[in-house]
Image (cartoon, grey):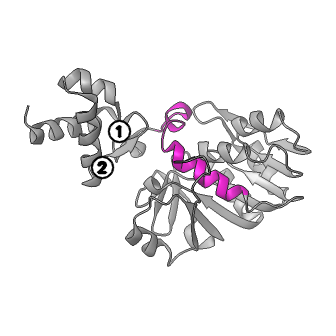
Amino acid sequence: MLKRERLLTISEMVNKKGILTVSEIIEQLNVSDMTVRRDLDELEKSGKLLRIHGGAQSLTYTLDQELSHTEKSVMQIKEKQQIAATAAQLINEGDTVFLGPGTTIELLASHLIHRKLRIITNNYAVFEVLAQAEVPEILLIGGDFRKNTGAFVGPITNDNLRKLKFTKSFISANGVHNEAISTYSTEEGEAQQIALNHSKNKYLLVDHQKFNRDDFYIFYQLHDFDLLITDPHIKPHVKDHYSQYVQIKLAESLENEL
């Protein structure tokens, strides 16, 4: 199979399935692991797909189907770890902090396990991380449980959030397109909107793959955030464009990286 034909086939496969692993491509096309990874890198550079851990994702997948918690947990891990570690530096002892849904936020929680903080969350995975630690005060906001993302949402969640005030809120999103911050679930978006509106300082944590992307429900405007933290792989022209709406901080490299 010629390279051009192979690239076209891979593009069609990933667009049809949404998420495709390297091993699936190897089996289908009978090519080497190295060849597949080179092809995926080339297709990403040409804007045909998104590279994720162990494979690739269609650019339009989140508009048609919500990714599960498991699927998100393997995407852009290094970048999310960098973002989480950088965000943790913004939190001071004694802060009252809201942590929203999302795998990046879960990684942030792991940096707070020995801090003297009051943490409120509707993210069950965040609660599990903190419940095993020494955080003095943890409040899990209940409600209707969304198994796909591990978030509590709905009227009970929203009513409780409206009664609280936060020093800082940290949230993520599925898409950042100009001013629009979007997610798949209207209910998750509504809960995050309330928490942000009740917070003194607002922080958006998104990896570079989330820019110039849309999802179903727009729940906030970019200019209303105090700071956006992303990873260093964001393209310079993309950073320049979004800097007109909000201050952007690039995550620092982790010490154990080569």
Residue at image point 90% right, 45% down: 137
Q: Residues within 10 Å of mark 1 (few under 14, many from 20)?
A: many
Residue 124 vs 238, above or below: the answer is above
Residue 71 image point, x, y percent: 49, 33
- Left/right placement of residue 208 relative to residue 195 reads left
Pointer 2 or 1: first along the chain: 2
Report if residue 70 lies within the magenta region.
yes
Instruction: Indicate the amino acid at tag 1.
Output: Ala
Element type at mark 1: strand
Element type at mark 2: helix
Magenta-colored span = 66-88
Considering every residue shown, the one lying at the far front of the view is: 258
Gap in Å between the C-alphas at discs 2 and 1?
9 Å
- Image quadrant in which you'd find residue 94: bottom right
Image mark for residue 43: none
Q: Residues within 10 Å of mark 2 (few under 14, many from 20)?
A: some
Residue that numbered label 2 is attached to:
44
Residue at image point 57% right, 56% down: 253
Residue 115 vs 169, above or below: the answer is above
**196 and 238: which one is in front?**
238
Residue that numbered label 1 is attached to:
56
